[in-house]
Amino acid sequence: EGVTRADQTGCLCKLAAILWAFGLCYRQVEAIMGAFGVRLGRSSVWRDVQALGEEMKRRRWWGRVRVLGVDGAWLRAKGEQTGVVVAVDLGTGEPVGLEVVDEHDFQAVLAWLAELVEALGVEVIVTDDLMQYRQMAAELGVDHHVCAFHMRRWVGRSLRSLTKKLGTEWRGILDEVRQIITEMPADGDLQLFELWARIPAQPPKAGEKASALYQLRQILVRLSEYWSGYRLYMEKGDVPSTNNGTERAIGKLKIRSRSVRGYKSDAGIQAAFQLCSGTFS
């Protein structure tokens, strides 16, 4: 098994690809193989990397993924910044798919996600607080959870900024908001709406900047309207509170990009995603 008409055995092909996944460039893999008496050119190593990446991708697509983490990033590829969107099985931490596309291209990302949802039986997607993911989840008919870390980060920053602008009379409401997003009560949406009703602020007129009080009202509305999406992890035990699994995969992609001084092709990005983020078996 593993010996064919090819010049390399199956074991040797996988070993070359794994060495690349560990951080070596094609030239270094060639040199290491040569030190052990194996004559293997860089082009052969490249083909081995692509082949193992495709094999791992096909193997993962046989399973079912209930909770899918999705996030976008920018990578150095072909001499310029390239947008990608990645998907990770948050149950196992294994990479599922990657699309070379700008995260803000709604229709392209939606079409890609629709394929994943149908093929893998996805029931929940976990993302950051980008509004378009809420719309995509609704169109795809899946539950949507917003990463708690992202939510608390933007709310925390906003409240710190407003604390400096508002007088002491509003500190009590600001503290109540902080307590609600810390405890995440089931009726948090109602509590936030009640706070919103206590704030007398009118929307800005054309050309005017929104007042600090109006900005606070907008934060309360945003939290209240999508409260179920922020606390879904408390309702469903297999949904993680954050999207850290997906961000770890992106982090590995970025590290590999630096070590190879930028990806040379879309195929290279795909291979790096599968090999550097996955588990070999």
Image (cartoon, rainbow, N blue to C red):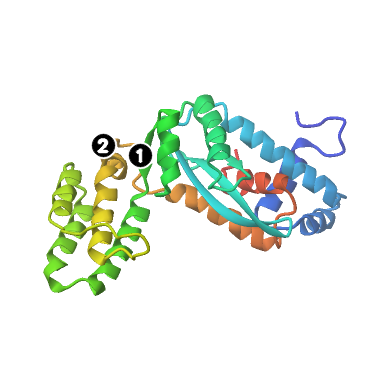
On screen, residue 19 versus residue 198, left or right, reads right
Q: Is residue 243 left or right of residue 22?
A: left
Name the amino acid, label 2.
Glu
Q: Give the residue at x 79% y 47%.
A: 45
Residue 111 visible (yes or no): yes
Between 132 and 69, the one nearer to me in the picture: 132
| Residue 75 screen position, x and y as percent | 62, 56
| Rendered residue at 60%/60% (across/down) | 255
Pick the front one: 5 or 63: 63
**In the image, what residue type sits under mark 1?**
Val
Provide residue 188's location: percent of width, then percent of height: 18, 46
Side of 150 where 188 appears, left or right: left
Image quarter of the C terminus = top right
Q: Secondary structure at mark 1?
A: loop
Q: CA distance from mark 2 to mark 1?
A: 8 Å
Q: Residue at x 59, y 42 (%)?
A: 98
User: Does 79 sit above or below residue 111?
Assistant: below
Pick out the residue farthest to the front: 206
Image quadrant holding the N terminus, namely top right
Residue 189: mark in rendering: none
Rendered location of residue 166, percent (x, y) = 21, 71
The reply to whether residue 63 is visible in this rendering is no
Look at the numbered disc 2 and give the secondary structure of its residue.
helix
- Numbered badge on residue 239: 1
Is mark 2 in CB contact (under 8 Å) with mark 1? Answer: yes
Q: Return the residue nearer the eye: 170 or 19.
A: 170
The answer to which image quadrant residue 12 occupies is top right
Q: Which residue is mark 2?
A: 235
